[in-house]
């Protein structure tokens, strides 16, 4: 059931203002020289714009256009003092100096001289300068930034009257109208449509100015429409590839999209304007997301060098202080920010985001509550509050908060998607065990609830013994039958690549039906997410992501053969080429990957690090690391306390461990060698021999390939190819050995597990067959043939309890002959000693088939008490 409010899309055709469209003709008449200077400015040739505008201004020509352009051309590259000096020079002898006060006020705003800025802007307005409407917008934004929201709103509201009364507004004035409407949209979301229309008219009035496109892109991005934002930014870049605000908006879009390019694009913006305090603060935010607080603080302080009252930069310093548990510094930054702007809800919204990104979900709830308490129209803060309430398990409270957020801003796609998801989640069926609550789609609940609680309880017991700790219970596990729904639960939008997520004692994951067969192992995924519940809880949610992920993969390896990921050629090549992140920058590989596949490589590298530590230092060292993070230590201090090493030294230990463990494979993957390296050459040779019928030669090549890279478990792994070829030629012993080796590495290959079960059965190894079949069900629990075979094998072995489980699973798959399925379940229950359940179950069979003789006989046995 979806929301019935307006569609969360912004279309320029939906303008709601009550004036006929304005013709695209309103530009001041300008000289040819000013036109050339303006062209240089709009296309990003700022040095040329400064030269041309400056020459005109010094000659007193084209006043005030040339003087304004001179200052703006300096300011856009961060030469703020030079811009103010240019205005002073142009002001000397000017007939009407008030014409320069709007630009002066704008520059003073950027450098934090707010009282002077306000005075200059009011002079422009009171003096009826030709750009007084632009000054009015600047003043409204300044008042907004100082917390004087009522007076700011009154100014913004006046732009509607201005629009309706204007006959021939300039493109810049239309852009100002659009910006004013984005502020007013907080109180009337329909005005966002009008903002789009105003920006569109500004574009039509001056197609060469990239600024209206950039501002419209920012609006679309704030409404979660990355595609439309990208289109507008492409158009702006086609006109001016060197616009610093366009580059910064691209960086914000990259952050929204989860792209590693966010930092690069922000740095590109700062190459153009190295003194932009907003871009510096945003770069600090990106480093905060990476938990690189040292770099973040450095960037925030550089922003403050330009603007000592930058709210964004001070906010990042407050976030850093909170993450570092520096309560005194946090209070100092918070109090300073609120003294500058008592209504600055963005402070607490940013703190909530930083807390969320570092897994401190309860802190995120508390910060978001402070944000909405400061500003009851901060709908994005309501959204942050509701989403984080869901993350800590407060489903009903979170729903109510998100309903408020949606009522205020129906264009927030994350909120809309989440509310739609909650409507679906309310129909999920609940299954409880001692320490878990599962919410599973009705179509899958009967089957999955047979397996998931049992595995979860096993994982809890194993990890509580391993960590000496128990997280708060019950742990809630939401199992989504559609990956898009899981993705919405995680990031609000479809398309996330993860399989599961842990918010502590609230977990969410794909069901096995949400992905194609063989794409993931739902058992190991559940185990992985439960591990996160332990490490997050153990450290009061202070464990860095790389350590939590590494331990989760290692915990998988302790659970079952083959679980826990496997090494790939790409990982070893990245290691050889030194493309893996250093330990000092480990989180970068997870949060800001620099190449496709680096996230997966980072998971595996983290698992190798903790495996090395467990093997060489003992698991007590792992616990000591977790203790350090719980005590509030940063990673360098943790390494020093536990190992007496810095990050570089531990890096060297890890590199030596990887070199030793994978030395033959690394050498065999050397692409500079003939044939692309020995490993690839051997595989190519084996396939050629096989296609030509030379089986012995093919097997010999595969055996050598396996020897140099024994841990490779891809779909073209020599171990798997050998298993198939040995079986084809009837060498079941060799095939059995190869399938055992392969399935001990690959947790997702269903065909290999089924083949292994068949070979184990042929070899008379009933226990091995049952183990292979059970592991196959963690890949695909929907295979009736596997359940049938496993049920028969368990009953043959006398394990009637396991037989009952499989017979229940078969009923969960809705078999064609339900009467027979009920009968076989009843028989297993009876043999397992559960007479009451056997009786009720066999009666279900007889309800379907009243003359079912075997069922009648079983019922007589049950009533007679015989076995």
Image: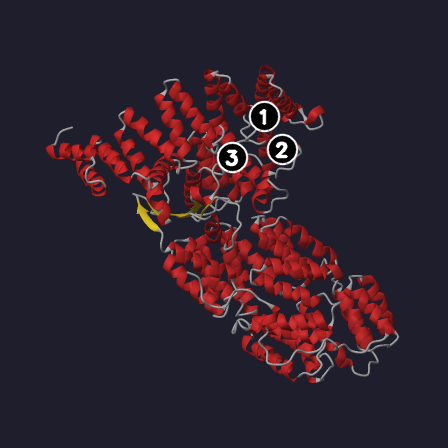
Q: Is residue 304 visible?
A: no
* Residue 560 in the image, given as x and y percentages of width and height: 42, 30
Residue 112 falls left or right of residue 611: right
Any mark on residue 607, and which?
Answer: 3
- Labelled pair 2, 1 in contact (Cβ < 8 Å): yes
The earlier-in-sequence mark between 1 and 3 is 3
Query: Residue at 65% across / 37% down in the picture?
Result: 579
Q: Foreground: 263 or 847?
A: 847
The earlier-in-sequence mark between 2 and 3 is 2
- Placement of 208 over or under 758, stated as above or below: below
Query: Residue at 38% across / 24% down in the picture?
Result: 769
* Secondary element at tag 3: helix
- Placement of 350 over or under 68, stated as above or below: above
Q: Residue furthest left?
A: 864
Q: Which residue position is annotated with label 2? A: 575
- Placement of 329 over or under 572, stated as above or below: below
- Labelled pair 1, 3 in contact (Cβ < 8 Å): no
- Labelled pair 2, 3 in contact (Cβ < 8 Å): no
Q: Foreground: 804 or 862?
A: 862
How many labels were placed on the picture? Answer: 3
- Look at the image and tell me in which quarter the C terminus lies: top left
Q: Which residue position is annotated with label 1? A: 662
- Look at the image and tell me in which quarter the N terminus lies: bottom left
Q: Residue furthest front?
A: 851
Residue 167 falls left or right of residue 620: right
């Amino acid at each position: 059931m979806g929301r019935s409010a307006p569609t969360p899309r912004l279309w320029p055709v939906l303008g709601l203002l009550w004036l006929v469209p304005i013709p695209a003709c309103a530009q001041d008449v300008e000289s040819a020289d000013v036109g050339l200077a303006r062209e240089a400015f709009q296309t990003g040739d700022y040095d040329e714009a400064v030269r041309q505008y400056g020459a005109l201004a010094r000659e007193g020509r084209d006043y005030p256009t040339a003087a304004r352009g001179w200052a703006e051309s300096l300011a856009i590259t961060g030469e703020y003092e030079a811009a103010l000096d240019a205005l002073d020079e142009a002001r000397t002898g000017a007939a009407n100096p008030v014409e320069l006060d709007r630009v002066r006020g704008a520059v003073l705003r950027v450098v934090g001289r707010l009282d002077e800025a306000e005075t200059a802007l009011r002079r422009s307005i009171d003096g009826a300068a030709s750009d007084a409407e632009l000054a009015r917008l600047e003043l409204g934004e300044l008042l907004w930034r100082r917390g004087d929201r009522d007076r700011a709103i009154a100014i913004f509201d006046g732009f509607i009257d201005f629009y309706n009364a204007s006959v021939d507004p300039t493109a810049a004035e239309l852009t100002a109208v659009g910006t004013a409407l984005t502020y007013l949209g907080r109180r009337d979301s329909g005005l966002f449509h009008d903002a789009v229309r105003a920006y569109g008219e500004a574009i039509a009035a001056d197609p060469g100015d990239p600024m209206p496109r950039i501002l419209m892109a920012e609006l679309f991005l704030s409404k979660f429409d990355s595609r439309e934002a990208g289109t507008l930014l492409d158009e702006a870049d086609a006109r001016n590839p060197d616009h610093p605000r366009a580059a910064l908006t691209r960086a914000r879009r990259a952050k929204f999209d989860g792209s590693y390019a966010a930092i690069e694009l922000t740095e590109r913006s700062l190459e153009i304007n190295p003194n932009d305090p907003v871009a510096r603060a945003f770069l600090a935010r990106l480093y905060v997301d990476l938990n690189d607080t040292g770099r973040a603080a450095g960037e925030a302080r550089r922003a403050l060098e330009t603007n000592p009252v930058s709210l964004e930069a001070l906010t990042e310093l407050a976030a850093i202080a909170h993450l570092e548990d520096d309560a005194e510094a946090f209070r100092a930054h918070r109090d300073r920010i609120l003294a500058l702007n008592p209504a600055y809800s963005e402070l607490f919204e940013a703190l909530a985001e930083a807390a969320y990104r570092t897994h401190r979900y309860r802190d995120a709830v508390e910060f978001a509550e402070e944000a909405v308490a400061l500003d009851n129209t901060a709908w994005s803060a309501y959204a942050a509050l509701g989403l984080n309430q869901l993350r800590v398990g407060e489903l009903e409270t979170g729903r109510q908060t998100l309903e408020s957020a949606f009522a205020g801003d129906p264009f927030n796609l994350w909120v809309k998607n989440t509310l739609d998801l909650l409507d679906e989640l309310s129909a999920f069926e609940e299954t409880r065990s001692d320490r878990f609550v599962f919410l599973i789609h009705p179509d899958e609940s009967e089957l999955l609830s047979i397996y998931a609680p049992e595995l979860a309880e096993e994982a809890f017991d194993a990890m509580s013994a391993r960590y000496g700790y128990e997280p708060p219970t019950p742990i809630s596990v939401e199992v989504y039958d559609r990956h898009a729904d899981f993705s919405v639960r995680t990031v609000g939008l479809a398309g996330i690549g993860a399989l599961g997520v842990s918010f502590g004692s609230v977990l969410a994951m794909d069901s096995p039906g949400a992905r194609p067969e063989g794409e993931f192992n739902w058992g190991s995924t559940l185990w992985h997410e439960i591990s996160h519940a332990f490490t997050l809880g153990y450290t009061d949610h202070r464990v860095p992501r790389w350590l939590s992920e590494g331990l989760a993969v290692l915990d998988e390896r302790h659970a079952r053969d083959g679980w826990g990921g496997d090494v790939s050629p790409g990982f070893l090549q990245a290691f050889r080429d030194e493309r893996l992140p250093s330990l000092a920058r480990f989180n970068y590989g997870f949060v800001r990957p620099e190449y496709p596949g680096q996230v997966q490589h980072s998971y595996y590298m983290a698992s190798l690090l903790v495996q090395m530590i467990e093997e060489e230092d003992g698991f007590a060292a792992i616990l000591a690391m977790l203790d350090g993070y719980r005590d509030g230590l940063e990673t360098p201090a943790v390494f020093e306390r536990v190992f007496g090493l810095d990050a570089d030294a531990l890096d060297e230990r890890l590199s030596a461990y990887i070199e030793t463990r994978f030395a033959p494979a690394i050498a065999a993957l050397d692409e500079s060698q003939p044939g692309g390296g020995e490993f690839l050459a051997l595989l190519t040779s084996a396939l050629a021999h096989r296609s030509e019928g030379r089986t012995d030669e093919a097997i010999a090549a595969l055996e050598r390939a396996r020897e140099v890279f024994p841990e490779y478990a891809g779909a073209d792994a020599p171990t798997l190819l050998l298993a198939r070829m040995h079986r084809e030629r009837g060498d079941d012993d060799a095939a059995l050995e190869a399938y055992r080796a392969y399935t001990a590495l690959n947790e997702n290959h269903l065909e290999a597990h089924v083949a292994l079960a068949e070979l184990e059965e042929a070899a008379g190894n009933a226990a091995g067959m049952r183990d292979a079949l059970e592991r196959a069900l963690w890949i695909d629990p929907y295979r009736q043939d596997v359940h049938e075979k496993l049920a028969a094998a368990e009953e043959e072995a006398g394990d009637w309890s396991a037989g009952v489980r499989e017979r229940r699973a078969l009923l969960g798959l809705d078999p064609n002959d339900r009467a027979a399925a009920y009968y076989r379940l009843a028989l297993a229950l009876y043999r397992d000693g559960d007479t009451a359940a056997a009786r009720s179950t066999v009666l279900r069979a007889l309800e379907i088939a009243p003359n079912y003789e075997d069922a009648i006989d079983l019922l007589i046995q049950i009533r007679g008490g015989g076995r």
